[in-house]
Structure formats: structure tokens, C-alpha cells
Image (cartoon, helix red, strand yellow):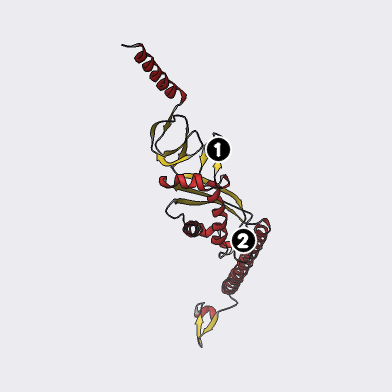
Amino acid sequence: MSTAFKIGAVAVSGILLFTLTAGQFTTIKTGEVGLYTSFDGKVQNKVLEPGINYDGFGSIKVFNTRKITVFANNLRPKTEGNTIMKDMDVTVTYSLIPSSIFDFYTNYDMSNHETKDTGEIQLMSSYISRLITSAVNQSVDKIPALEVNSNLDAIQNNIQQNLNLALENNGLKDKIRIDSVVVVRADLPDSLVESINRVVVAKSAKEEQEVKTQTAKLKAEENQQLASTVTTQSLEYQRLQVLKSAFESGSVKTIIVNGSPLNFLPDSAIK
């Protein structure tokens, strides 16, 4: 083996070793995809599937394609009649179609995304958050304030429909899927709650007074009937007692019943 060949083999091995050690491997998990950025900063329009991928002289950015949750809290939509809700919290989950990752990462600036403390970029999270605010306003403004909490299922459905409509209007219907919408909290303004409480207390007091009045009326009628019954019985009892005493003393010998005399003593005693 010639010296030149040996030198060439060593050189090739060195280059290969340098190439392998210069780069690194990135593991893309299930529910994730990746985009490769070359050493010159260009993002390749090719979505990397789950598995072990070699970075080479560039880098691989990993993105979540599982369901992403957005918490839209402290919303204050107006109801029918222009009552402003004190607080409404809404939770929305959405999913990105994997083939749309390149478009979202390269064509939408970071104001549309959210960067986690771990450095992970949640694509379109901030964008969805803005859509939620608008969708909630549209879904609540036709419902009276006092009926909001009894119509949460309908409000959730309306929010999801409005979100899908907004995505369609922005050409994103086939790129983002809204998986669920949950209204976690819907608080009425304090002034309205206080008014409701006053009405409830007043109504309760009125009903209580009506019950007391009705009870007193029934009791009075009962006493009146009882008094009438007792008086009649007492009079009858007293009359019988008088007759008894009269018969026993002999002062009454005969009484007339329906025009006919009734003797309560023997004829000899009457004579």
C-alpha cells in the first residue's frame, strides 16, 4: 500500500470523523415533527418525522403536533343589554396539521407563537388566543346576563363555531383543528349579583310574610269554628243540666214536645 493511499485514507477518515463529531443527533418523539435549518440559516421545507435525525452542520427545531391547550382568562365580554361580565375563563385545545408546520414557522412572526420556559415554541398559540377573545365576544353578546350560566353548553358550541369560521376566513381551516372549548368560569358583575340577592331576599321575605298571613287566617277560621261548636255544645249541655235539676226537684212534671205533653212523673204524683 502506497504512502499516498494511506495519507488519502487517513484524510477521508478524518473528514468523516470530523463530520460526525461536528454535528449531533436529535430525537423526535411521537406527536412531534421537526424542521431542519442548515448552517447558513435556511429552513428546509421538509417535515422530519419522529425518530433519530442527524443535525450535521445545522440544527433541528422540534415542534409539538399533539393537542395544544390555550387558557384565555379574565375575559370581559358584553352580554345582551350591554352588561359586562366580571370574568370569563375559557380553555381551548387545538391541533396543528403536521404538513402546515413549515408555513407557520417561516411565514408567521413570533407574535403569533408562544415560547415556553423550556424553549419549546408552541406554534400559533398566541394567534389562537386572539381569536378566542373575538369568538367569546360574538358568542355572548346575544345572551342576557342572567341566562349566561344556564346556557354554557350553547356558548361553548358557539365559540367553537366562531373559531372555525375565523380560521376558514383566514385560510387556515385545513391547517388548524379546534378540538374542544370549555367555559371554565363565568362571573356576573358584583353590582348585578347584589341586585339579584336583594330581589331574592325581598321575594323570600314577601313569601314568608304571605305564609304567616295565610297561617294566621287559617288559625283564626279554625278558632272561630271551634268556638262556634263549643258554644252550641255548651248551651245544649247547660239546658240538659237545668232540665235534669228541675226533674229531680219535681218542679217540672210535664214538657210539651211537638204539641203533645210528656209526663216524667207518675199520674199520682202529678195530681
**127 or 55, nearer to the observer:** 55
Name the residue carrying label 2: 78
The answer for how far apart the CA atoms under marks 2 and 1 are is 32 Å
Query: Element type at marker 2?
Result: loop
* Percent coordinates x, y for residue 18 in the rendering: 44, 21
Whether residue 171 is visible here, answered yes or no, is: yes
* Percent coordinates x, y for residue 46 in the rendering: 41, 41
**Quadrant for the C terminus in the image:** bottom right
Residue at the spot 56% in from the left edge and 44% down from the top edge: 110
Q: Are marks 2 and 1 in contact (CB under 8 Å)?
A: no
Number of the label disc, if any, that sits on residue 133:
none
- Left or right of 211 in this view: 48: left
* Percent coordinates x, y for residue 159 in the rendering: 51, 57
> Is the residue marked by circle 2 packed among few (<14), some (14-19), or many (20+) residues within 10 Å?
many
Q: Residue furthest left?
A: 1
Occupied quadrant, residue 137: bottom right
- Left or right of 115 in this view: 15: left
Whether 196 is drawn above or below 11: the answer is below
Q: Amino acid at mark 1?
A: Lys
Whether 147 is drawn above or below 65: the answer is below
Residue at the spot 50% in from the left edge and 82% down from the top edge: 262
**41 or 245, nearer to the observer:** 41
Q: Residue furthest bottom?
A: 259
Occupied quadrant, residue 66: top left
* Percent coordinates x, y for residue 67 in the rendering: 45, 44
Number of the label disc, if any, that sits on residue 116:
1
Q: Amino acid at mark 2?
A: Lys
**Quadrant for the N terminus in the image:** top left
Labels 2, 1: front one: 1
**208 or 70, nearer to the observer:** 70
For marks 2 and 1, the one nearer the N-term is: 2
